[in-house]
Amino acid sequence: MKQRILIVDGHSMIFAWPELAAMHARVTATARAELVRLLNILQDGTDWTVAVVFDGKGVRPSNESDPGGVKVFYSKSGQTADSIIERLAAKYAPDCDVTVATNDRMERQTAESFGSLSISSDQLLSEIHAAGNAIRTEIDRLKRRR
């Protein structure tokens, strides 16, 4: 079975979800951290390996993350998150099952041209909720076994 990779357009998700958009209006870093927290739930509750890409305006370029956690990328000056997403999709789609989460229609078409699937912010949120429910169900099951 091929590795499943989910590449998330970070700001597309933040601006699509009202709670994160409100956080972003106050403190950008808080909204980004909350999105990464939600994506960790998804990664922990599924077989997806998750990467999130943010435009790095004013942020030191990076691709750091916690070991075992969601991989976080920030674009460099003069580079867009879209270009990183496209590069990752092109690199991994031949050997992995890649899905790109974005509401940007052009970005979805480009990712699909590399052989990736694409999902919207609503679909991603549903996946996060399902993963969270699966984790809670498993925790409850383990508690009952004690």
Image (tube, grey):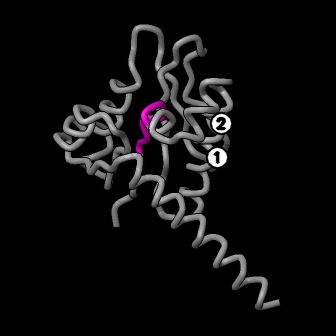
Q: Vertically, is 138 above or below 84?
A: below
Where in the figure is residue 62, as x and y percent of width and height? Answer: 57, 23
From which residue to which does the magenta span run? Answer: 7-12
Q: Secondary structure at mark 1?
A: helix
Residue that protrudes farthest toward the bottom in the picture: 145
Residue at mark 2: 33
- The quarter in which the N terminus is drawn is bottom left
- Let me know if residue 136 is in the magenta part: no
Front residue of 141/104: it is 104
Q: Which mark is residue 37?
A: 1
Label 2: how many residues lie within 10 Å, few (<14), some (14-19) or many (20+)?
Answer: few
Q: Vertically, is 103 above or below 73?
A: below
Q: Amino acid at mark 2?
A: Ala
Where in the figure is residue 50, as x and y percent of width and height? Answer: 49, 48
- Tell me if 79 is positioned left or right of 20 in this view: left
Q: Amino acid at mark 1?
A: Arg
- Let me know if residue 10 is in the magenta part: yes
- Tell me if 103 is positioned left or right of 40 in this view: left
Q: Secondary structure at mark 2?
A: helix
The residue at 52%/18% (across/down) is 56
Where in the figure is residue 5, as x and y percent of width and height? Answer: 40, 51
- The quarter in which the C terminus is drawn is bottom right
Label 1: how many residues lie within 10 Å, few (<14), some (14-19) or many (20+)?
Answer: some
